[in-house]
Image: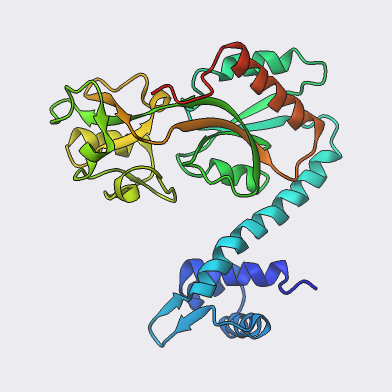
Amino acid sequence: MIDLEARELEYFVAVAEELHFGRAAVRLSIAQPALSKAIRRIEARLGVQLLSRSSRHVALTPAGEALLHHGRHALNAVSAAAQAARRAGDAQAHLRLVIKPGGDAHLLSGILAEYAARPDARRVDILFGGATDRADHVRDGRADVALLYAPFDDLTGLASETLFVEGRVALLPRGHRLAARTEVRLADLEHETLARWKGVRWTGVPDDGSGPEIADGAQMVQLIMLGRIIAVLPRSLVEPVHPGLVYVPVTGAAPSRLVVAWSELDRRPLVASFVEAAVAVAAGLGAPRQDAG
């Protein structure tokens, strides 16, 4: 038995994200009383309280937090399923790859050449995503495959193959007390203010990032140069280094993996062929498959 319909999930996610019934109703183009009634019906069916309400405040309960997390993924899966069905019937469909600009560890040109040489190759459309949204491009069907960095990107609902494993570096202003070091330990960074990326849990660094929330690399560089934050990133994401900054290898930090990822439900040959090409290129170039320090 299906406890919730997609439309009901859409209603709840809108309220959970807005934390305001009026704004959510406008977003959904429905009347506010109807939306309130729908949320009460969902709570009654599930037997839990999802939202704590007062005349001035709406907040998520622990049950609501859980439903929001899984509900977003469920709605993405429904959207992706519809798009996949449409694309499966299109024999000339292009393959859509989403990447972060510069986030390919210098492997992309070789991967595209290897894939293009395959008899079943399709045209590859390159989409550029932001620092934190590329996995969502795949989950909701906007892209077929992605190059992602684990453990930073959320791989929930995705299958993946590791292409490149590398160490992390601290990105510092040139006048920083640690800038002249040949390497630093995680303990050396305990009292530093670290960049905190919007929507990303930067595991393996003190406090998972304690500084201001940032959304892109330009914001990060500006704040580092002003001495407000430092950042701990995969080595390949800081090359070439900005002239006003330096990077120092971090020992003791868990390695970063560049992966090619796709929906775990996507069994299409065009996706499998691209993944095979990516893995072959990474192996042929001797891309490190363990932490290089």
Q: How far across and down, in percent of the image, does residue 73 sit?
A: 62, 56
Pick the front one: 163 or 142: 163
Q: Tell me residue 181's x, y (percent).
A: 19, 23
Whether residue 27 is visible here, answered yes or no, is no
Residue 65 coordinates in the image, percent (x, y):
51, 68
**Residue 180 seen in the current view:** yes
Q: Front-most of 149 and 108?
A: 149
**Looking at the figure, which quarter contains the C terminus?**
top left
Residue 191 at x, y percent in the picture: 19, 45
With 8 as the anchor, is 58 left or right in this view?
A: left
Left or right: residue 283 compared with residue 82: left
Q: Is the residue 180 above or below the residue 253 in the image?
A: above
The image quarter containing residue 148 is top right
Above or below 220: residue 10: below
Which color scheme does this rendered protein use?
rainbow
Q: Residue at x 58, y 47 (%)?
A: 136
Compared to residue 31, the image places residue 84 above or below, namely above
Quarter of the image that includes the N terminus: bottom right
- Residue drawn 77% across and 71% down? 2
Looking at the image, residue 7 sits to the left or right of residue 36; the answer is right
Depth order, front residue of 274/25: 274
Q: Hey, which quadrant is residue 171 in on the image? A: top left
Residue 135 located left or right of residue 132:
right
Q: Residue 215 is drawn in which quadrant?
A: top left
